[in-house]
Amino acid sequence: MEPSPTPRVLVIMPAWNEAEAVGDTVLEVLAASDHYDVLVVNDGSTDDTATIAQQAGATVLNLPFNLGVGGAMRAGFKYARRLGYQRVIQVDSDGQHDPSSIDEVLAGLEHADICIGARFADRGNYKVGGPRKWAMQFLAKVISSLAKTRLTDVTSGFRAANDRAISQYLDHYPAEYLGDTIDSLVVAIRSGCTVTQVPVEMRIRQGGTPSHNPVKAAVYLGRSVFALLLALTRKPSKVGAAAPGLHEISGV
């Protein structure tokens, strides 16, 4: 009897004016495994993001205008459900997420519904400071308490979801600022989804310019607290049976 074929994994890349980096990122992801399909959600770009992504081998879903990461990911989850994918993973189109770590993050789905690739988990040298760091530490503490497991990087966009989590996301995945990280995660946990994390290393952007500065870091602190409070007011979704067991991976 022949072994069952390995299920396809959908790698979703939200992209807004990432022509400088998206092509190389797509090529690197596709080279990492024969089981990855790449969907670039072109979030209203005004440059050549869509053309370059398609030439690199990605399927491109064009949004008519910029919706932000939350709106782009929501479109990606709808695409995944329509085509029958049972595992998806979000990867930044700017090259910061190392494609060689995708399998490690996906492995967390053996024990949980959502797995986060954590930047602050004793691996790599990615650092933040000031108000942004305080916000991340506060958010991690509160959401760890909700999830009943230690999470160190709840704002990471490098995260995977199984079929159960996809169903929950389709019911609730906000497009507001930080909705794709904080709000979506809090509601998923309150709806019964289990969460784990694996340590990953972050890379510098392969193109474009980082958007963080001291003023934006202070604004981030205020907005992140507001996003958390808003998430806690959301109604939980109804999802199927829980994933078997919850374990942290790689000693995190």
Image: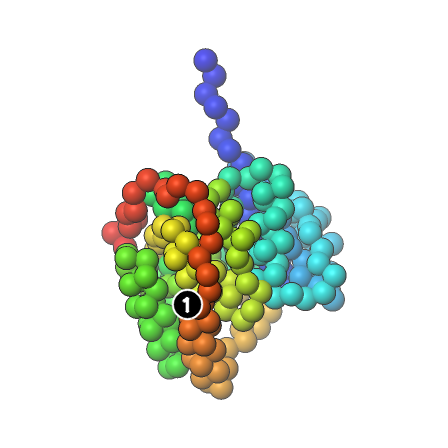
Asked where in the image residue 209 lies, by quadrant, the reply is bottom right
Looking at the picture, tell me which residue is in the foreground, 189 or 4. Answer: 189
Residue at 48% of width from left, 82% of height from top?
219
Crowding at mark 1 (Cα within 10 Å: few <14, some 14-19, many 20+): some
Name, please, the residue furthest toward the bottom.
215
Name, please, the residue furthest toward the left.
251
The answer to whether any part of residue 116 appears in the image is: no
SS at badge 1: helix
Amino acid under disc 1: Leu
Residue at 29% of width from left, 63% of height from top?
145
Name, please, the residue furthest toward the top.
1
Looking at the picture, tell me which residue is in the foreground, 105 or 57. Answer: 105
Looking at the picture, tell me which residue is in the foreground, 44 or 189. Answer: 189
The C terminus sits in image quarter: bottom left
Asked where in the image residue 139 lies, by quadrant, the reply is bottom left
Residue 71 locus on image (x, y percent): 61, 61
Asked where in the image residue 66 lies, by quadrant, the reply is bottom right
Residue 154 locus on image (x, y percent): 39, 63
Q: On the picture, is 15 further left or further right than 128?
A: right
Marker count (numbered): 1
The N terminus sits in image quarter: top left
**In the rendered image of this protein, does residue 224 appear above or below residue 173?**
below
Residue 213 locus on image (x, y percent): 49, 82
Residue at 51% of width from left, 39% of height from top?
86
To which residue does mark 1 refer?
A: 232
| Colouring convention used in this rendered image of the protein | rainbow
The answer to whether any part of residue 63 appears in the image is: yes
Q: On the picture, is 181 further left or further right than 67?
A: left
Residue 122 locus on image (x, y percent): 29, 61
Residue at 46% of width from left, 49% of height from top?
238
**In the rendered image of this protein, does residue 233 appear above or below residue 13?**
below
